[in-house]
Amino acid sequence: MVSIPIRNIWWLMLYASDLGKSSDPAQLAAEDLPEEIPDLVAEILARAVEQRQRRQLSTAFRQRQAVLSRVRGRIDHLSTSRRQLLAKGQVACRFEELTIDSPRNRYVRAALETVARLASERALAHRCRGLAHGLRLQGVVGAAPDRQQISNERFGRHDQIDQPMLAAARLAMDLALPTEAAGPHCLLDPQRCVHWLRRLYEKAIGGFYRLHLSDAQWVVSTGKPLSWPLQEATSGIAQVFPSMRTDIVIDRRDRPQRLVIDTKFTGVYSKGWYRDQTLRSGYVYQIYAYLRSQEGRGDPWAEQADGLLLHPAISIHVDESVRIQGHRIRFATVDLTASYQEINRRLLELSGC
């Protein structure tokens, strides 16, 4: 497994945080990310909350029980009869009401309070505490949900505006992971959670390209499914035939130019039968299938597609390529022990954008 410095793990978490275009690319380039991650995340979260508060915060329904002088919702017959409420001109009711004290808003308030304790700049910490206090004054006073509960949140067309704020809040809450010292929470050590790092690396590379490539010129897709050009298929083949899903696809808008990127959280070389170093054959077959299977369907971008297998590395540089049946396939590494500026430059150079 690649041993990544903790400063660059936070770099990966920032780009994997689903903040997308809600962050300011100029700010991300200007700040010293590895050294001032908490301050940067606090700034992003505070800005997202301030932008969201320019409009009324989203509300949610909650269940309530109350004794009222008129019927609202459903009557609680047992409680009404037991307490003889009708004789007093009252009735026990169960009903739903709209409230600003939703799990989503409580999570954002808790994130502001958390990042305020982590920020090194006093003015920024005060700003986050002020925003959290403002939410309490508006009625967001309930206990904060945990990460599992907030992951069940779904967005409709009317509340898409909440996504940047909630994504920033998730990232701020993740900043509570820097130590394994005894405390109230049981946390995974990122250095030992290989599956988590593998997924983080894939999401971060996709998030990086979404953030740094102009929407006016490029289309960046992640997790894009591809279909096989199947013919004469039997009735049961659809249930057992493997599917294809790319990690990252970058398309140029003004002319047919496509780059299919497959991220691999392994070493670029393995030991071969007759030599010490060889490219992993399974990965070569995979990227070859991604490229060749999409030909002949009337898509000019598929006809001009190139592939990139992108591996993390430590202090080594690999950049080899070959053209196979009209498609250039590149095998390259990015050094995750380098500074974030060097990583940025390397990723942009590999994309050819």
Image (cartoon, rainbow, N blue to C red):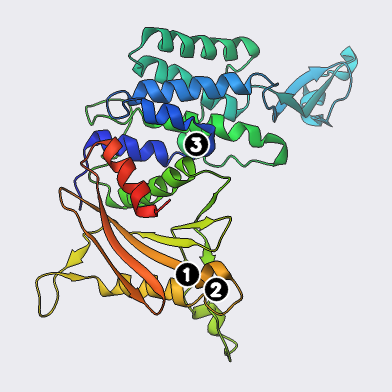
Is disc 1 placed on a helix, strand or loop? strand
Label of residue 227 in the image: 2
Residue 86: x and y in percent read 88, 19
User: Looking at the rendered structure, which numbered label has been put on residue 19?
Assistant: 3
Looking at the image, residue 26 lies above or below residue 69: below
Please tell me whether residue 290 is drawn above or below residue 170 in the rendered image.
below
Residue 10 position within the rendered picture, expressed as x and y whole percent measured from the top left = 32, 35
Q: Decide: marks 2, 3 in contact (CB < 8 A)?
A: no
- As helix, strand or loop, the secondary structure at mark 3 comes to loop
Q: Amino acid at mark 1?
A: Met
Q: In terms of sequence position, does the residue under pointer 2 or pointer 1 come before the other?
A: 2
Density class for disc 3 (Cα within 10 Å; few <14, some 14-19, many ≥20) is: many
Question: Is the residue under label 1 in contact with that under label 2 (CB below 8 Å)?
Answer: yes
- Give the residue type at disc 2: Ser
Mark drawn on residue 67: none
The residue under the point 54% across, 33% down is 22
**Could you tell me how far apart the alpha carbons at marks 2 and 1 are, in whole angstroms?**
7 Å
In the rendered view, tell whether residue 245 sits above or below residue 201. Answer: below
Residue of label 1: 244
Can the viewer see residue 269 in this picture?
Answer: yes
